[in-house]
Image (cartoon, rainbow, N blue to C red):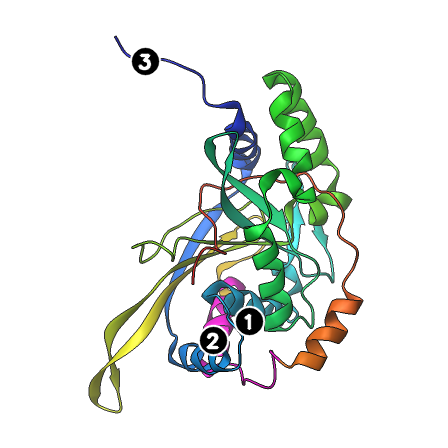
Amino acid sequence: MPDRHRVARQRRHTQYFLRHIRTTAPVFLDTDVDMSGVVTHRDEATTHGRRYSYSTYVLWALAHVLQNHPECNAVVGQGLVPRLLRTAEIRPKIAMDRTIDGVRAVLSATLPDLRGASLDDIQRELTRLQDTPVGDLEELRGVRALHRLPVRLGWWAFRSSMAMLNSRPQRLGTVSVSSLGHRAVNGFHAMGGTVVTLNIGQVRTVPVARNGAVEAAPVMRLNLCFDHRAVDGAEAADVLTEIKEMLETGPTLTQPGDASASAARSMAMEPRRPTTTVGTDSLPEQTQT
């Protein structure tokens, strides 16, 4: 006999989220990023006692690029003519693969405003989210509360929280980032519920053409999903291209990882507040090394 059972209550937030984003109009763009500069910087940083994930570099580049594209750093409301809320803050929502009461589930957390954040600032936040037990993360109090509610009441609570557009940047973020690069996944396509979602694949060694010769280089597939209700393909393509160019140029060791700049940034970062988190259909970016 087939074993029929309900979806685990620990994954109810994902069901609510997927129902919530049915009205979006996702379009997907892809590019390949030559990560040679990032790999060089990462290796040099390791010799100085600093360790950065590839996702940290993507978040760093994203925060710089979005400052020039406010239309892509926004949240969209429901309705025949959707409302658009723009904000100066750049608050990425990241997906995490965690276990809740023995059930593997996708959770998410919204990072603090990343304007001016260094690689050290970003990596510190990702490490905290990765290393802190689920039950101790303030960001996950809301989602655990949703799990305890009956389904109809849980959906009502989720939908009501998403209807408050002014609080959406804290709850859903202004941009989404997900990664499956810690596994053998070259690329994938997912919608994170924001105007722009970045999806990160693995960094793999492939042949590339340089100056008329073929060389081996570390290359990462980067996907950008944009909500066509809020932005058109030309600007989305600009965002993806500029992120690619910034990663390929590569940061300098003294610029984004400068200890004094990082310390000043940490002091200025806003106090963390509990948020109701929502899941995407992708796995955690902070597990990527």
Mark 3 → mark 2, Cα distance in angstroms: 48 Å
Give how far across and how far down residue 222 sits, in percent: 41, 63
Residue 145 at what x, y percent from top left? 67, 28
- Determine which of the numbered discs, if any, sits on residue 61 in the image: 1
Tell me: residue 142, above or below residue 75. above
Q: Is residue 85 left or right of residue 99?
A: right
Left or right, residue 49 beside residue 71: left
- Give the residue type at disc 1: Ala
Magenta residues (range): 235-257
Near mark 3 (Cα within 10 A), the count class, few <14, some 14-19 or many ≥20, is few
- Answer yes or no: do the residues labelled 3 and 2 have beta carbons within 8 Å? no
Residue at 74 percent of width and 68 percent of height: 266
Q: In the rendered image, is residue 120 in sight?
A: yes
Residue 50 belongs to the span the image colors magenta: no
CA–CA distance between discs 1 and 2? Answer: 7 Å
For discs 1 and 3, the disc positioned in front in the rendered view: 3
**Extreme residue toward the bottom, this view:** 211
Numbered circle sitting on residue 93: none
Q: On the image, which quarter does residue 215 sit in?
A: bottom left
Can the viewer see residue 239? no
* Of pointers 1 and 2, the one earlier in the residue sequence: 1
Nearest the eye: 197 or 69: 197
Asked if labels 2 and 1 touch by Cβ distance under 8 angstroms, the answer is yes
Q: Nearer the viewer, mark 3 or mark 2?
A: 3
- The residue tagged 3 is 3
